[in-house]
Image: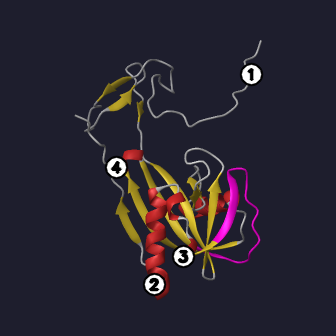
Amino acid sequence: MTKPAPSFYFPNPRTLHYCTQCGQSLERIVPPDDNRMRDACPHCGAVHYQNPRCVVGLVPIWGDRLLLCRRAIEPQYNKWTLPAGFMELGETTAQGAMREADEEAGANLELGALYTVIDVPHAEQVHFYYLAKVLGPELDPGSETLEAKFFTFDQIPWSEIAFRTVSTTLKYLVEDFPRQEFPLRNYSIIHHKVRHT
């Protein structure tokens, strides 16, 4: 008897319990010649490194309008975002950003310069957003998008923006657009936990 397929899928947790090479239980140790705790296998010696995940996306502009996508998935279901997602193995950040924009917005786009690089250490991520020129009004959003829509800058739904990396990128865009100068911006978003006493 086979188990039915799950009704939804979610990203694999970062914490590992078993070695992906030999199946034995892992230990948390500082390996020789290393300086931080790692998941390591005492049976075969494999060290399971965990590194930040890359989120790649576009800032699509059509004339004086910005293209945003309303999310059809969690987290932040029904909120607006720039077309973006996790980079896949074997692609560059630019290729990943173009792929994500095609999947989420279905717009005809021309890739521009890298615009923001945002460190998000509490989420173990780095976000890369490229500028992009929209070549026409036709949109064909995919299954992860409820709606794709063009906004003038004064119509941006600030209270409905999904992520801080998106809202900060958009704030820089609103500041830079009148001058038509778009310097590369690199910054961090630090999560401050509230301590309850």
Front: mark 2 or 4: 4
From the viewer's perspective, tell me whether residue 52 is left or right of residue 21.
Answer: left
- Indicate whether 78 appears above or below 194: below
- Splitting the image into 4 quarters, where does residue 181 fall? bottom left
First reached walking from the N terminus: tag 2 or tag 4: 2
Residue 197, label in figure: none
* Mark 3 residue crowding within 10 angstroms, few (<14) / some (14–19) / many (20+): few
* Residue to which mark 2 is pinned: 181
Please tell me whether mark 1 sits on a helix, a strand or a loop.
Answer: loop
Please tell me which residue lies in front, 67 or 106.
Answer: 67
* Residue to which mark 4 is pinned: 191
User: Where does the image place residue 189, in percent across and percent down from the top left?
Assistant: 36, 56
* Residue to which mark 1 is pinned: 4
* Mark 4 residue crowding within 10 angstroms, few (<14) / some (14–19) / many (20+): few
**Rounded to the nearest whole Å, what is the CA distance between mark 1 and mark 4?**
39 Å
Residue type (three-letter) at the residue carrying disc 4: His
From the viewer's perspective, tell me whether residue 195 is left or right of residue 95.
Answer: left
Q: What is the span of residues highlighted in magenta in the rendered image?
A: 132-150
Residue type (three-letter) at the residue carrying disc 1: Pro
